[in-house]
Amino acid sequence: MTLPAFLRRPRLALAAALLIALAVLCWHFDFRPHHWALRPIPNVLRTLLAIAVVFGLAGFGVVRLLLPDKLKRYELLWVLPAGGCVAGLELTVLGFAAVPYAISLALVLLGGFALSAYAVRRNGWPEAEAVHLAWPAYLTLIILAITLIPMVFVQHYDAVTGTGSDAHVATGVAQFLKHSYPTSVNLNQPINQMQPTWQSKYPIYYAFAAISSVSALATWQVMPILIGTMFALAAIGLFLLALEMFSAPVTVALLAMAFAGLDRMALHTPMNPYFNQTWGYFAMPFGMVLGWTLVQPGLSSGARKTTAGLFVIFALVMVLAYPLAAPLPAVPLIALAIANRHRRKQAGDHVLGIRDLYRGRRSLIWLVPLAAALAIPIAGAVDKIVQAIRELLPGQPVNGSWRGDVTHYFAWNWFFSLPDSPLGYVLFALIIGLAVMALWHAPRPLAIGLGGLLLFGLAFGVYLRHLQDAYYFEFKLLAFVGPLIVLTAIIGAWRLRPYAAPLVAVLAVALGFSLVDQLDRNGYQLGQPTVALSSWAAALPPNASIRLDMFPPDQIWAGYFLDARPVCSEAPLLDTDYPHVAISRKADYIITSPPTLARPADAIGPVLRYNDGYALYRENPNVPGPSYCTRRRFDRLYTGLGYTPY
């Protein structure tokens, strides 16, 4: 019997098998009539097109001019990642220079186009081979599709998923930056100012705003698609890391990309969603690959300078987006630089010294405008790192503001896509053994640098588990380190060639069950009844005030969509870093949640509006006292400076 043509081509058969597995996974989570699943697709495509335009224009010329020759085989894979970083940094500089946002966005797009044209004229078009790009691109799309399953096949409309409460601030900040100076206060926006504790993170929110503007979609619609894309692009970085740093064959690098890119707790990050952390995670592998290339012998002086420029772009975005991740690539890269210093001298390379960095005051004059434009983000990053160090000193519990919305320690094995069971610990020992095998056969500088980082990450994770209330820090640390260990273990399995297939098969089964369990546990925070509140607010008389009678945590999204009117509550969400509404009993209207609650004592007349989540009543005008409802939102910092929420 003759096999079908695609079965006689193993790669094509594998591609089909992955597509079938994805279809089965989607079918498993599609609990509603199937035509509902198609509803978010047009906006998904619009957002992806906007990402391709903005990041593609911003990144193509930069990559074409700066990427060293030894990395150009996969040059096109660098374009979108570099473009996301470049666009965010450029918009930040222009924003602090008081250039109106619309003009800034136009300048970034036109400047990217002009630089791309110059790069092509100077260096020609990239010599890309489809065979080199097809599989990494295909796996990237598979990973992106998996991150979107909760939104498309469970929620069935484009909006934020998960339970991470930072999401409403993230979408609000991106909206705020479209219309406001970075350090200003704007009461016409759902979030009135940049979150005080996020002063370093402007680049990623400017990039977020740009995608929202070009796609013509609201930030809360764009967020799950953009964050899923950044997570999928991180997998490309992991592929390049395996390929360039470990010199793994393409097939092995693709396997490492799939296993590490779908690590369970790394996947938890974009689906919940932790926007800042996802950007830091995304930039990390690209920065590590560029840093590794930078310290290798045999690189020309010009190539070393351009590589350093591209490295700084990724490193700066990673540090500003997620300052606590800064040591992760820095530790191995410093070790690699020291270990390779002697090799480079033997190869006749010029080793960077103080004289190369400082050749008089004129050599550093270019730093003045750059430092002025990025002073606030850099100061915010430094402040965040200092605060974290203070929190992690032994002998005291972690401050409540550093616990985030994580309330417990996650199962240790989840960070490696393994079950929380005795079998999981056996497989964890296997993964550690395979990682050691990979590092044993790796170049010594890489083994020392990366091996030291992974050992430190595991040891520090154990230390954090023994601190009081440090579960947020542990989650953040191991969500970065776990995928790197899994990637290294897959490369170690390749070293055990006779046993590689069964080892990978066992880990694949564990990964499959972990993915299903993680998707099953995903939460949902933004229902369509909440989105409908914006139309309720628009239908009320101008300046009509609204009191929120609901569970305080539910007020964050309700207040977000009622931002067009003054809002208040008798019991707002206090003692958090999230913006909360003012305290007031007196208002013009009352919204209750759930809608099945009895009519509030201060209400008069029948229910005016009603949906599955809320009910609207008119408040009795005879309720005593003044109204303190306002469009201003309050937090710890502004309350401490003298602002009062009543």
Image (cartoon, rainbow, N blue to C red):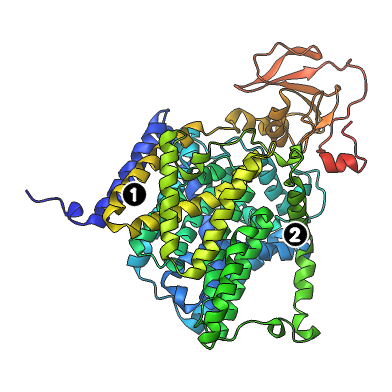
Seen in the picture, residue 294 relative to 280 is either above or below; the reply is below
- What residue did someone put label 1 on? 504
Nearer the observer, 492 or 82: 492
**What residue is drawn where x is 34% and y is 60%?**
495
Nearer the observer, 272 or 630: 272
**What residue is drawn where x is 55% and y is 80%?**
342
Amino acid on which disc 2 is placed: Pro
Residue 589: percent from the left, percent from the top?
Answer: 78, 22
- Residue 284, quarter of the rendered image: bottom right
Answer with mark 2 or mark 1, whichever residue precedes in sequence.
2
Q: Is residue 278 left or right of residue 485?
A: right
Marks 2 and 1: CB-CB under 8 Å?
Answer: no
- What residue did someone put label 2 on? 377
Q: Is residue 427 visible?
A: yes
Q: Secondary structure at mark 2?
A: helix
Q: Is residue 383 left or right of residue 412?
A: right
Seen in the picture, residue 170 relative to 238 is either above or below; the reply is above
Q: Which is more foreground, mark 2 or mark 1?
A: 1
